[in-house]
Amino acid sequence: MSIQEEINQLTDQLIYHAHKYYVEDAPELTDFEYDQLSRKLRALEAQYPQFARPDSPTQRVGGEPLDSFQQVQHDYPMESLQDVFSYEELWEFDRKIKEEYPDAQYTVEVKIDGLSVALDYRDGVLFQGATRGNGVVGEDVTQNLKTIHTIPLKVETQYPRLVVRGEVHMPFEAFQRLNALREEEEQPLFANPRNAAAGSLRQLDPAVAARRGLDILCFNLQNADELGFERHSDTFAYMASAGLPVVHPYRCTGSMDEVIRFIEEVGETRDALGFGIDGIVIKIDQLAYRRELGSTAKAPRWAIAYKYPPEVKETKLLDITIQVGRTGVLTPNAVLEPVRLAGTTVSRATLHNQDFIRSKDIRIGDVVRVRKAGEIIPEVLGVVMEKRQGPLPEFHMPAFCPVCGAPVSVDEEEAAVRCTGAECPAQLARNIIHFASRNAMDIEGLGPAIVHALLEAGLIRSQADLYFLQAEQVAALEGLGEKSAHNLLAELEESKKKPLEKVLYAFGIRHVGEKTAKVLAQHFPSIEQLEQAGVEELTAVRDIGEKTAVSLKEWLGSQQGQHLIRRLQQAGVNMTQPQTQQGDKFAGLTFVLTGTLQGFTRGECQKLIESLGGKVTSSVSKKTSYVLAGEEAGSKLEKARQLGIPVLTEEEFLQMVGDKTAD
């Protein structure tokens, strides 16, 4: 078999198995087997790029991060729909249509709550993907769309061009997984799947979009007229046969009674769809009638969207319980008298924080109004004051963590109450996962699944316990063995050598990120020096503000923080920082890197600048000293020119460095 034949065979195999996994939900290979095939194909393509196919699954990883999105002029306008909110309006729509077209049929389909895009296939291969934008001009998000596994990179079609409209969305499961991860990383949570999908699709780094779990369902063949189709329902069948995922459920009928029956059926079961919808779309099926009816300046005359009304119900607030999240935030939750809401029974709802409870004067025993925010998350809207019976006591957040008993701190800016315990069991999984992460202690093989397995087995109760594990204990865990146990213990042993900056970041102290940890470790090169430093001494250090200094001192001085540090020292974990700064040539200078550098990676360049006393930031501002521009530099270069910031070529930068890189 030739190399080209082998690459073609591997490509076809991976496309088949990806379709079975992502589209049919019926995998035939294990993840390990699929990864092995993928690695083999990637290696062959790297060695023989001339044989790599445009529909290869390796293309889904996306390209280099972009500086901005290019605008795209839509050849086929992407119109919006007129919304209606009552059955009376539907009957009026039906009356007008049937007066002119008595035999008109309707396709009735769910209105997915996501982001509309156009997929442009040329000779069966995905050429370009763009957002709707204003309907006439959108943004080129091709690289991000390629990371969505349900979008075929190649379709089976006899037509030279297919332009397909679909709705990119985030399934409920992916949304919950993403928000759980963002909570662990102390990032703001997305309000609903639609916002999450829109934010993910417009990420400048395709690698970020690839991790978000986006999906798509197609609902229109934009160039159906010129391809000779007569009915919209026929295009659904054709798109499905070409390998495109088609919107579901949908129905074809000539009866408005049947349309309304479909609306009610979907309304009762929409939670089971697995993705968000906000209504039902009713379209004339016959394309010839659509052409004759045309569009207004705002929307087509041949379609309408029925929007489901938000469902709000009253129920009794039985209690308020406190949940300690993985970031230590104490969240009050309402315990409700069970009530049926948007297709499910609701007995709990978030109350957000103390300010929310106070502003709405919510008290245990009240009758409250509840709904599902974004049709997913139950929330309390307010109190039915006329139903309050007698004086009820006000609610106050606890002064101590209900899980570990550590004092809580109040963040006035965020209206958040946090547990200060370094070893709080409620935060333990998150803390250990962060401790082992690549940018912290970088313990390869210690992912979330292994961490949870160790916790469930009772083998660890803190980060320090990792270093006292025995090989036989790890090997006994399900899915592991002697070799995996040996590798993990070797990784743990290697991590003991990490510098203090990595240990500080690994602690997960509030306001102490990677850069702050590095600055602190350079000024206080041992944990003892850091413990002895006062708030004034800390705030005298560049980039260390009072909030960070206070948070650090509270953590270092806490009983749990001290216990963790001493246990790690007992295990032999390094608590010192080597002094790596090799000069002060760049002291006081701030650099921004953009484009592709030839001599080294951005990470290597950043280390070089920092070793000479400089600082690297991600955005250009008036405070920027220099912009180092590599090949294909984008918007950052343009902004630097607008602000009059000096721009360096790679050669000019190396001249500034001088003898540092002469070797």
Image (cartoon, helix red, strand yellow):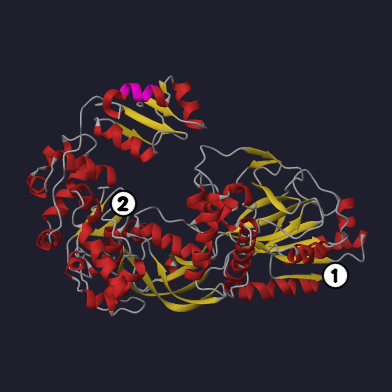
Horizontal placement of 35 versus 488: left or right?
right
Tag 1's secondary structure? Answer: loop
Q: Position of residue 516 (x, y in %)?
A: 25, 43
**x, y percentage for residue 121?**
72, 51
Question: Which residue position holds label 2?
Answer: 439
Q: Residue at x 81, y 65 (%)?
A: 233
Tell me the element at label 2: loop
Q: Residue furthest front?
A: 1
Quadrant for the C terminus, please.
top left
Q: Classify residue 662 by image quadrant.
A: top left
Q: On the image, which quarter does residue 86 sit in?
A: bottom right
Magenta segment, which residues?
A: 652-656
Up/down of 245 relative to 65, above or below: below
Residue type pointed to by label 1:
Gly
Q: Which of 130 and 582 is in front in this view?
A: 582
Residue 393 on image: x %, y %: 28, 69
Check if residue 431 falls in the magenta segment: no
Residue depicted at 7% across the width and 46% down the height? 532
Would you say the magenta stretch is mainly helix, strand or loop?
Answer: helix
Q: Residues within 10 Å of mark 2 (few under 14, many from 20)?
A: few
- Residue 206 seen anywhere in this rendered image of the structure: yes
Label 1 environment density (alpha carbons within 10 Å; few <14, some 14–19, many ≥20): some
Image point (29%, 23%), residue name: 658
Residue holding disc 1: 254
